[in-house]
Amino acid sequence: MASASVVGGKAVTPAASTAGAVPDTQLKGVNRREFLFYIWGASMALFLGELGGGIVWFALPQFRAGEFGGVFELAPDKLPTAAVGTVPTAYTPAKIWLSNTDDGFRAISIVCTHLGCLYKWAPQGATGHEFPHFVCPCHGSQFTNKGEYVTGPASRSLDQFEVTVLYNDGTKATTAGPGAAVPSTNIKTIQINTGKKYTGKTHA
């Protein structure tokens, strides 16, 4: 214990040495309010991370082969005979019409471009037309077997899906856009990508 000295008749106790003393601010730990704030912040960050991951998952879905939105692989015997006026074949799993015409093969969406009805194939002479065609039973829009607009309230031709054909000689061809077809002879495999749709051309 430090001894007192007398200065001017008064006892004075020397001040304790402050060397090596730790400031009060360093002695304080995290209090309850700060701890709860950190826990809340971490919980919110975790929640927002999971929410963002879920949004990305649903916005960018992954489709399996043979599932609408994915790729369908067909054998060439699924193809209708190549000839003008050949009756297209409905392929329900892919929601398409397989249409093989004089200029090649194409996969046409089964949905009418007017109001989304499911159109049908009409034989020659039906509904007053001299050639076979697609006709929508809801509002009468009509299209050729190539999906091209003929008449009715629809504003554009039918939509198509991307088609890639692998040939027996090792070559391949892919549809280049709306209205396009690929050669339909000497086919080994047909691949229809229902995840890539070509919007039908708007008519004048």
Image: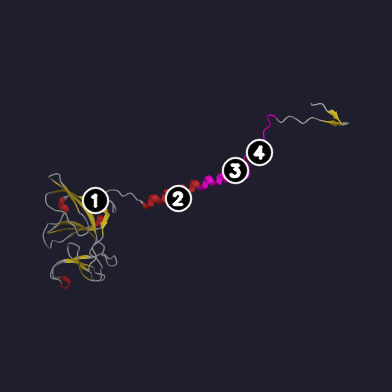
Residue at the spot of label 3: 35
Q: Which mark is residue 72?
A: 1
The answer to whether residue 110 is above or below residue 126 is above
Residue at the spot of label 2: 51
Q: At which x and y percent is residue 65?
A: 27, 48
- Residue flagged by tag 1: what amino acid is it? Phe
Q: At which x and y percent is residue 195?
A: 28, 53
> Alpha carbon of mark 1 to alpha carbon of mark 3: how far?
56 Å
> Alpha carbon of mark 3 to alpha carbon of mark 4: how far?
17 Å
Closer to the N terminus: mark 2 or mark 1?
2
- Quadrant, the N terminus: top right
Closer to the N terminus: mark 4 or mark 2?
4
Residue 31, magenta (yes or no): yes
> Alpha carbon of mark 4 to alpha carbon of mark 1: how far?
69 Å
The part of the chain drawn in magenta is: 19-44
Location of residue 2 by image quarter: top right
Q: At which x and y percent is residue 160?
A: 23, 58
Closer to the N terminus: mark 4 or mark 1?
4
> Alpha carbon of mark 3 to alpha carbon of mark 2: how far?
24 Å
Left or right for 16, reference 95: right
Most distant residue in the bottom direction: 128
Q: Are marks 2 and 1 in contact (CB under 8 Å)?
A: no
